[in-house]
Image (cartoon, coloured by chain):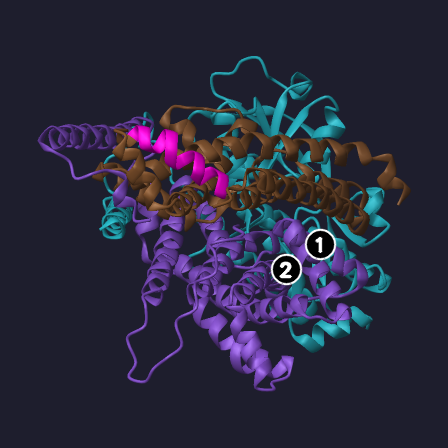
Amino acid sequence: MKTTVLFDELGPRGQARLRTATIVASIVLVGALAGIFVQLDHVGQLSGRLWSPLASWPNIRYLLDGLGMTLRIGLSCAAMSLVFGTVFGLGRLSPRRWLSVPAAAAIELFRAIPLILLVYFFLIGLPAFGWNLPPFWVLAVPIVLHAGSVFAEIVRAGVNSLDRGQFDAAAAIGLRRGQALRLVVLPQVFRALRPALVTQVIRTLKESSLGYVVSYPELLRNGQVLGEYNANFIQAYALTAAFYIVINFGLSRIADLLDRPPRKRRRARVAPVDSPAPALESVS
Amino acid sequence: MSVLFDHIGELFTGLLVTLELAVLAFPLAVVVGTVLGVCRVGPVAPLRAAAGCYVQCLRNSPLLLVLVMVVFGLPYVGATVPLFGSVVLGLGLYFGAYVCETVRSGIAAVPTGQVEAARAIGLTFAGVLRQVVLPQAFRSMAQPLGSIFINVSLASALGAAVGVQELTGSARQFNLDHAQPIPSFIAAAIGYLLITLTAGQLTGVIERKVRIRR
Amino acid sequence: MRIRTATRTTVVTTALLATLTACGSAPGHAPGAAAKPAGAEIAGQIDQTSVVDAGPVGQNLPSTPMLDKIRQKGELSFAGSRNTIGFSQLDPASGKLSGFDAGIAQLLAKYLLGKPNAKLQSGGSDTREALLGNHTIDTAIQTYTITEDRAKLVNFAGPYYLAASGIVVKTSDTTIKQASDLAGKKVATESGAAKDALLKAVPTAQPVLFDTAAQCVAAVEQGRAEAMTLNNASLYGVVATKSDVKLLDSTFGSNPFGIGLPKDDPAFKDVVNGFLKAIEADGTWTKLWQATVGKLVKSPAPQPPQVGSVPGS
């Protein structure tokens, strides 16, 4: 339902009321924002001493280095988690119980515990076994396991929402299950899941913010160090937040662009698959 | 292992704190999210923009950042909330943004005919929402809301970074004191599994009961 | 369009933040803001480079597995902090590590290798023992308190520094004057050695744990905790920039810091102890203290602690 249907075409009295409501809302919002700024100024949080270190190029470069590391680990974890998620999601759908049961168990396990607990386990538990991973992997493997399990459920929902007819047609022309998956199901599911791919990248980027636990120098940890060094950690965190918001917002705009219906092609094509329900989006 | 059982009380206390955080933060998130969702579908443009901006900013920031800002930044704006309350507030505000999106899709799932019928009998915008649309929207949102509850309880693990000793923090503290990482983390994982599996089952039961058969 | 309005508003807010940063030269309104130095100025005063350049190089050192491995690598890897003012603080802009612990690491590297090639690795209080145990790092020089429990897992060379815990309270607070006044009160601190020292001295205190020193201070400023404790020398740097908290004169506890070493090479422990004795004898220790902690504490240099004087070392 288009939500503009919620309110009717407004008559003159309705429009006047709407105008008043709009003006009042604007005044209240701007006033609240201004009030916050005045209060912050009053307690000295807007002073130059606290904000000027953030304007110096070496410090900004330090944050940008952190951003680079965040992108590096976020993007590689996104790629790995997509593979992990597809493999395990399809595994869970398999009719062979020796595949589906372990896959389901793994997915449920990694979705049911917090990411930070998983990171602590890899950080502190593995050395107890004698295994040693560089900080990148100590952070990356838990993220892949956690985000990959979330994506596995999305893939499962995607495959389940595919029209039964596709499976039946594939069987009718003699494709084995594996071939059917590869040639018919997966291409359609991934086309439908394009926006979910970008959401996955945003998810792994945010989850990489746990790098401070393993001393991996990503954006949030660098912001923390900067705040400690210059004794202005609120300000440093605010700037770090701005970085995250800009990057992730940019990515979600790309997701919106991908969600637009594809242009008409010349030859006749199968009716587009419905997008899977906006479901199981686990967040972090 | 026996050391773990001697100190199981600490971990159990941590589990209770996690539950408290989740049980308090989730309703707050639902309230915040519903208000935001209504703003997003309403006719008043500045409210739509402000709610949209809020949702975008919070959904695109890491939760840890939001928690630190709420715990340490809010006092500068005049409101010093005790640590536990700050973490509840931070979680509620953050997941409120997610609930907003869920509410919007729930509203979109209500058939247009319902709204038109509501307007035909003379209900105002508020009346349409309150009496017709939202009840039906919520009944279709049981599953996503249950999922958000699970996320809230998992996200409460970050409370340890800002001074609230919940399950993960207790496990880590136990490990620092007694150097037994495997038993303590497995115990914490079991605690979280208990919460998530119970919540998952409950969500299924609730969803089946309130489902609208069209 | 809804999306466009939201985009516009988000862009405007982010631009506002950026403008705030750019216009950072606006005069501060907080009382006393002009008098207090910026954090980076404090950190900038601490520089041990000249002391390290003049440090001794070990002669005729016996061959041990660890020493051979370090010489083969050409560098000494150590677990250290990036955030501890006066002991080991990383300047984000220049990448330089300055402080007492950093100096000890660099001097040790110079003693063993002839050049101060000390490489900082990540490793926190949770993982130090395990990382030393499987030789991911050669040493741990990280305000690492010697305890008998830890000595079962790693070897300690030293002690090389005797730290006391300091107490920071709000400037307006007159009720807390010494450690015993902390009984039953909420005290902000970092988990690890600081918390252990607090509970050893004041078992009824209620620790509130945060990740960083700045957060602990903010907790006191905002009334979330009535006091905070950390290593005394670090606290000087932490409160130097703030006017609404003060550092008490009274200190408590005695934390001996040692150099953590892998358990399986006792000969290496003797080599490192030899290094410590050397720098204590020729005055390098005192010069290092004066260049780092001395700039913060402003009292005469103490006598270096005697090697092996603490149980566990």
* Residue C202, numbered label: none
Circles 1 and 2 in contact, beta carbons < 8 Å? yes
The answer to whether residue B172 is visible is: yes
The answer to which of A270 and C199 lies nearer the viewer is: A270
Would residue A249 appear left or right of A23 to someone viewing this image?
Answer: right
Chain drawn in cyan: C
> Looking at numbered disc 2 in the image, what kind of residue is underneath it?
Pro
The answer to which of A232 and C300 lies nearer the viewer is: A232
* Residue A142, numbered label: 2
* Residue in view at x 49 percent, y 48 percent: C46
Q: Tag 1, which chain?
A: A
Q: Quadrant of residue C206?
A: top right
The answer to which of B101 and C190 lies nearer the viewer is: B101
Name the residue at the right extreme: B2
Q: Is residue B126 above or below residue B174?
A: above
Q: Is residue C162 above or below residue A222?
A: above
Name the magenta segment's main secondary structure: helix
Label 1 crowd (10 A; few <14 / some 14-19 / many >=20): many
Q: Name the N-terminal-most of marks 1 and 2.
A: 1
Chain drawn in purple: A
* Residue A121, numbered label: 1
Tell me the magenta residue range. Answer: B126-140
